[in-house]
Image (spheres, helix red, strand yellow):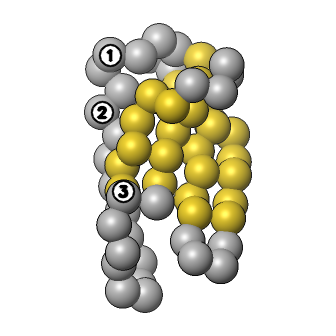
Amino acid sequence: KLSIYNALGEKVAELVNSSLTAGKYQYQWNAQNVATGMYIYELRTDNFVSIKKMVLLK
């Protein structure tokens, strides 16, 4: 699962919500309807979680 949250912790997008085989993947987030600012993305699998910050500049 790949989700994006705003600075308040509200989910603003869910880019992936399915099982994928091992490999490299690339996704684009259409951030047209969200404001410039800091966002948090969370990558979650059955046995791994990664949470990172990113800045959206328009």
* Crowd class of label 1 (few under 14; some 14 to 19; many from 20; radius 10 Å): few
Which element is circle 1 on? loop
- Amino acid marked by disc 3: Val
In this rendering, would 11 be left or right of 30?
A: right
Tell me the distance, in whole angstroms, between the alpha carbons under discs 3 and 1: 18 Å
Question: Which residue lies most toward the front here?
Answer: 46
* Crowd class of label 2 (few under 14; some 14 to 19; many from 20; radius 10 Å): few
Q: Is residue 16 visible?
A: yes
User: Which dot, 3 or 1, sits closer to the camera?
Assistant: 3
| Quarter occupied by residue 7 | top right
| Quarter occupied by residue 9 | top right
Q: Residue at x 51, y 20 (%)?
A: 57
In this rendering, would 23 be left or right of 57?
A: left
Closer to us: 40 or 55: 40
Tell me the distance, in whole angstroms, between the alpha carbons under discs 2 and 1: 8 Å
Checking the image for residue 30, the label placed there is 2
Check disc 1 and report the residue beneath it.
33
| Quarter occupied by residue 31 | top left
Which element is circle 2 on? loop
Position above or below: 41 against 12: below
Q: Earlier along the polypeptide chain: callout 3 or callout 1?
A: 3
In this rendering, would 37 be left or right of 32?
A: right
Checking the image for residue 16, the label placed there is 3
Quarter of the figure that contains the C terminus = top left
Whether label 2 touches label 1, CB < 8 Å: yes
Tell me the distance, in whole angstroms, between the alpha carbons under discs 2 and 3: 13 Å
